Amino acid sequence: MTHDKSLCQCGSGKMFSACCEPVLNDHSRAGTALQLMRSRYTAFIHKHDKHILASWDPSTRPRALNHEDHPVSWVGLQIHETERGQENDTEGTVTFTASYIENGQFCHLKEKSRFRKENNLWFYINGECDLKKEKIARNSACPCGSGKKFKRCCLQVS
């Protein structure tokens, strides 16, 4: 990955090279459930299946991922709350909203994700989800923040 001089897409405000990139390259670098959750969001943006699957608890992990069946444009991540999930914990939760565009709709996936730590590695188990979708008018400003009209931006991708 060559995004080392840019801000991390997880919304932390840190540089990619100092935030999610080390975790994407080495799962053990996630010291907290929140760090793992942020890295997984970034991995979905980059379609980094190796990290997504390796950081998914074996008891709930799918065999494979297929991004082509549901192409999305990720727009942003907002963290609402964390419970436990610190370096000395063995379990924790992270509540967040991930926003994305799919099939001309602006989607907000609010999830309370459960994580567990085993052998010093954090794993995503599962989450309670609430999905809200709203249609985006073609001439509206694109929700990705580009400043372009939706029809000239992410509508062409979704």
Image: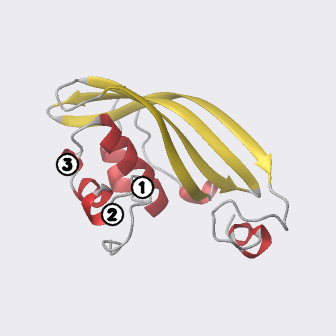
Q: Which is more N-terminal, label 1 or label 2?
A: 2
- Find residue 42 and name its label: 1
Dot 1: element? helix
Q: Residue 90's mark?
A: none
CB contact under 8 Å: marks 2 and 1? yes
* Residue drawn at point x = 21 percent, y = 24 percent: 89
Query: Mark 3 sits on what residue?
Result: 29
Circle nearer the N terminus (2, 3): 2
Does the image show residue 136? yes
Looking at this view, is 152 or 127 the one in front? 152
Q: CA distance from mark 2 to mark 1?
A: 10 Å
Relative to 102, 112 lies left or right = left
Residue beneath disc 2? 16
Real-space Cα separation, disc 3 to disc 1, in angstroms: 15 Å
User: Crowding at label 1, few (<14), some or many (≥20) Cα neighbours within 10 Å?
Assistant: many
Of mark 3 and mark 1, the one earlier in the sequence is: 3
- Image quadrant of residue 91? top left
**At label 1, which amino acid type do we have?**
Thr
Categorize mark 3 by other alpha carbons within 10 Å: few (<14), some (14-19), many (20+).
Answer: some
